[in-house]
Image (cartoon, grey):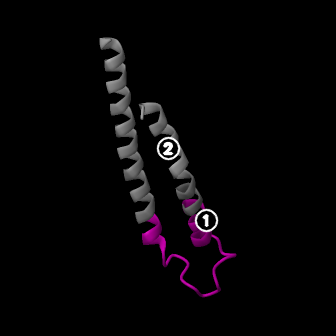
């Protein structure tokens, strides 16, 4: 597998994460979906934790992509 497929895999696997982050954000910050008198920020800590996990995983993916790209360019130059 070459480095170009890692980019597409990472983008494809981020589609559910973007949907989850968007829907949870709407659920937490929208008055329409929360009952009156309810604690709408009850899951805010989980929401922020999930965003941090997604960012950390994406950073590892970007580092892996850059490393594979650099190694592929070095192999092309040595041939």
Which is nearer the eye, 41 or 8? Answer: 8
Residue that lies at the very extreme toward the right in this rendered image:
32
Q: Which of the image's four quarters has the N terminus?
A: top left
Q: Is residue 1 left or right of residue 34?
A: left
**Which residue shows up at 44% across the image and 70% down it?**
46
Q: Is residue 30 left or right of residue 48?
A: right
Q: Position of residue 20 (x, y in %)?
A: 56, 63
Element type at mark 2: helix
Which is nearer the eye, 39 or 73? Answer: 73
Q: Count up the numbered dots.
A: 2
Which residue is under mark 2?
9
Q: Position of residue 34 (x, y in %)?
A: 63, 80
Element type at mark 1: helix
**Which residue shows up at 47% across the image and 71% down it?**
44
Q: Is residue 34 left or right of residue 49?
A: right
Which residue is under mark 1?
23
Q: Position of residue 79 (x, y in %)?
A: 32, 11
Residue range of the region highlighted in magenta in the rendering: 21-48
């Amino acid at each position: 597998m070459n480095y170009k497929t890692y980019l597409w895999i990472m983008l494809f696997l981020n589609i559910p994460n973007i949907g989850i982050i968007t829907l949870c954000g709407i659920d937490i910050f929208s008055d329409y979906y929360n009952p009156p008198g309810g604690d709408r920020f009850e899951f805010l800590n989980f929401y922020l934790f999930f965003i941090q996990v997604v960012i950390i995983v994406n950073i590892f993916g970007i580092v892996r992509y850059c490393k594979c790209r650099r190694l592929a360019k070095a192999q092309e130059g040595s041939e």
